Amino acid sequence: MFDVSENGSLPVRVRFAPSPTGPFHIGSARTALFNWLFARHHGGTFILRIEDTDRKRFDPDAMPLLLDGLRWLGLEWDEGPEVGGEYGPYFQSERSALYQEWAEWLVEHDLAYRCYCTEERLAEVRERQKAARQDPGYDRHCRTLAPEERARLHAERGGEHVIRFKMPLEGTTTVHDILRDDITFDNRRLQDLVLLKSDGLPTYHLANVVDDHFMAISHILRAEEWISSAPVHKNLYAAFGWEMPQIAHLPVILNPSGKGKLSKRSAGFTEGGRKVPVLLHEFQEAGYVPEAIVNFLTNVGWSFGDDREVFTVEETIARFDLKRVNPAGSVFPVEKLDWLNGVYLRDMAPERLAALLQPVFERAGYRAELDRLTQVVPLIQVRIKTLNDALDMAGFLFTEQFVPAPPEQLVPKKMDAAATRAALERALEMLEGLPDWRAETQEAAMRALVEEMGLKAGQLFGALRVATTAQAVSPPLFESMEVLGREASLARIRLAIDSLA
RNA sequence: GCCCCCAUCGUCUAGAGGACCAGGACGUGGCCCUUUCAAGGCCAAGACUGGAGUUCGAAUCUCCAUGGGGGCACCA
C-alpha cells in the first residue's frame, strides 16, 4: 500500500509513542524532544501515538500529564490525540482489529504460531533453565505441535492462546542504527516473542511494527533499551514484506547519584542533599521554566557546536542533526539545569517573570498581585535560579503576619544588644523624618548615620535588614524597604527595637 | 549466565590521523566589585581507562582486556 523504494527520500514522519502507565519521565521527554526536533528540522511530521495496550498497568492520570507536559515544553504534535490526523486512530487500544488481522496473516503464512502454554508452564521452563544455567527464554514448545496435539490443547484451554513469532532459527540479523552503524545478532539467541496476547491485544513488538508501517513512519527514534529487540522487529518487517523505517536508538540518561538509568527510583537525594526531580511535573513544581528544560535536554546527548550552551529552540531546529547525537549514555547533570534556568530567568522580560511568579506565590499561600510582583521582580531577578527561589528571597514582602527574627540575629558582628538597639532607634528617628521613601533617600540618610555613629555600613544595614526582612539574606536593603513601604518598614523596625529591650 | 551498546576533566561535552603539551560549559577554589545574597569581571586546578597493533605520525583506525550501561515478560 505504500510504495517505498527509497526510504531516505520519503517525507519525514516520526512518532513519540509513550504508554500511559504513569507520570511523564524526563527521559521520555528527551526522546520526545529529539523526535520533535528531527521532524521540525526536516520539515516533517511529528506524531503522538499512545501505546495503551497494557491494561494492567494503565494509569488514568498518565494521559493529562503527558499531553500537558508536551504542550508545556512546546512540543506540539501534528497528528495524534486531540488533533487527529489521516493515519488514526492514534490510540493503540482502538486499533486492535488491525493487529489481530496481521497476526492472523502471519499464522496463515506460517510465519507465526499459536502458543497454548500456560503461565505456570512458562515459569516452570524458566526455573528449569535457571537451574541448568541455561539462557532464559521460551522453549518453542508450541512451534512444532502436531495437528492433533494442537487441537487437543486448543480445546483444553478453551481456545485461549497467544500468537508467537517464528524467528528464523539460524543465521544472523543485522540492524542498521543511524548512530551506531550495523549491529549484528545471532538469530539463535533471539526469541519467539509474543505478538498477540491472550486478551487479544498486541505486544509492543507487533503494535509498533504494524503502526509504524501503516502510519508511514520514516524514522524511529527510540530509547536504547530497544536495541536488543530491534532484530526481531527487523525480522517482523521482513515477514510482512514491509520496508523497515530507518532507526536510531537514543542513549539513556543515567542516575546522577548512583548507578543505573535514571528512573523514578532515582528520586532520592543528591550529594548536596537536594531532591533530584525525575518526573516532568516535578521540574515544573520545582520552578523550572520550559525553555530552560528544553535547552538543557538538548545539551545532554547532543551538542550545538561552536562552544555554545545557550540557544533558542529555533536555533536548535536549524542545527539539529541526528548524526551528532552521542551514543554514550550520560549522567543527568542537574546542577547545570539550575544554572541554565537562572540564565533564562535573568534574561526574561520582567513582566513575564512577574506573571510566572504569581501562581508560585499563590500556591505558597501568599496574596500576590501582579503590579506588586512587577515591583519586586527587579530586586530578585538576578538572584534566583528557580521560580521557587523567589519565595525565600522575597516572601517577606508578601507576608500578612510578619514574624520577626529572634533578637540575637539582629545584633551585628562586634556589637551588642544595647548598641544595636541604640543604632536602630536612631535609624528609626531619621527614617521617620525622611521627605520621601525612595531607596536613594534612605541610603543617603543611613550612610550619614553610619558616619555619625562610627559604625560600618554592613553593621547598620545588617541590623536593618534583619529587622525589616527577618532574613540574613535578602535583596538590596533600601530597595526592599522602598517596596515594602514606609509604614510597614517602620513598624518592623519598631518591633525589632522592642525585642532588644 | 548469555547477547548487545558505550568509553575525553567530578559532570555535560568539542574533537571524525598531523591545526591538541586536548577546546567550551556546569560545578569547585582564588581575586575584583559589593550593605547581605546573587549577578558580573579576571585567574586557577582538572581528562584522552589500560595494553597491543596499523601509521612517518593516533584522543581519533583495528584487536584484546577492563570498566560502565542496556536487554534476556502474555511491560512498554
Image (spheres, rainbow, N blue to C red):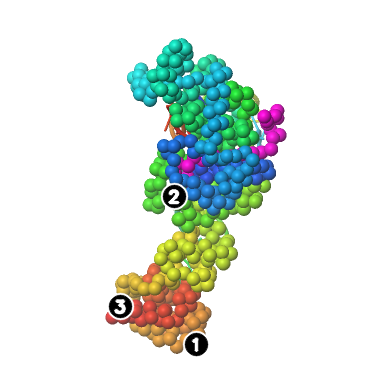
In the image, residue A125 sits, relative to residue A324, either above or below, namely above
Q: Residue at x 38, y 75 (%)?
A: A467
**Is A24 within the magenta?**
yes
Q: Residue at x 44, y 49 (%)?
A: A277
| CB under 8 Å between discs 3 and 2 | no
Looking at the rendered structure, which numbered label has been put on residue A499? 3
**Is A407 within the magenta?**
no
Which residue in the rendered view is the most extreme toward the left? Answer: A501
Q: Main secondary structure of the magenta part?
A: loop
Of the numbered discs 3 and 2, the one sitting upstream in the chain is: 2
- Viewer-nearest of labels 3 and 2? 2
Residue A385, position in %: x, y?
A: 49, 59
Position of A236 with respect to A481 (left or right) is: right
Of the numbered discs 1 and 3, the one sitting upstream in the chain is: 1
Q: Are marks 2 and 1 on the same chain?
A: yes
Question: In the rendered image, which quarter contains the C terminus of chain A?
Answer: bottom left
Of the numbered discs 2 and 1, the one sitting upstream in the chain is: 2
Chain of the residue under the numbered disc 1 shown in the image: A
In the image, residue A397 sits, relative to residue B27, either above or below, namely below
Q: Which residues are magenta?
A: A1-25
- Between the residue at mark 3 and the residue at mark 2, the CA separation in whole angstroms equals 41 Å
Chain of the residue under the numbered disc 2 shown in the image: A
Residue under label 2: A277
